[in-house]
Amino acid sequence: MVVDARGVSCPQPVLMTKNALAKEANIEVLVDNNTAMNNITRFATSQGAKVEVKEEGEDYRIVISK
């Protein structure tokens, strides 16, 4: 599942990530700012998930797996 949170301000990207993780064990989240990337990474790690961040130009692709 891919969650596109580009252009969305916090805390919405974290809430979108939380809702997606409730449905799927493996997701990708697209964000366009450093703050959202850091917040999502912290949230996913606190949930015991493995997190990998890939920079794609000015965007970030966050791969999360439980």
Image: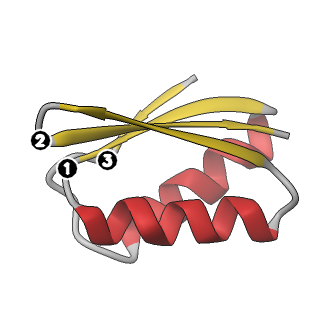
Left or right: residue 30 versus residue 7 is: right
Left or right: residue 57 versus residue 40 is: left
Depth check, front residue: 15 or 63: 63
Name which residue lies at 21% across and 59% down. 33
- SS of the residue under disc 2: loop
- SS of the residue under disc 1: loop
Residue 34 in the image, given as x and y percentages of width and height? 27, 64
State yes or no: discs 2 and 1 in contact (Cβ < 8 Å). yes
Judging by the rendered image, the residue that carries numbered circle 2 is 58
Q: Amino acid at mark 2?
A: Glu
Q: Amino acid at mark 3?
A: Ala
Name which residue lies at 62% across and 31% down. 27
Give the residue at the far top of this rendering. Answer: 1
Judging by the rendered image, the residue that carries numbered circle 1 is 32
Distance between mark 3 and mark 2 Cα atoms:
14 Å
Left or right: residue 3 versus residue 66 is: left
Which quadrant of the structure image shows residue 52?
top right
Image height of 9 relative to 59, above or below: below
Name which residue lies at 39% across and 59% down. 37
Judging by the rendered image, the residue that carries numbered circle 3 is 5
Quadrant position of the C terminus in the picture: top right
Residue 41 in the image, given as x and y percentages of width and height? 56, 60
State yes or no: discs 3 and 2 in contact (Cβ < 8 Å). no
Depth check, front residue: 34 or 8: 34
Which quadrant of the structure image shows residue 44?
bottom right
Image height of 19 relative to 56, above or below: below
Quadrant position of the N terminus in the picture: top right
Q: Mark 3 packing: few (<14 Cα in 10 Å), some, or many (20+)?
A: some
Residue 19 in the image, given as x and y percentages of width and height? 64, 53
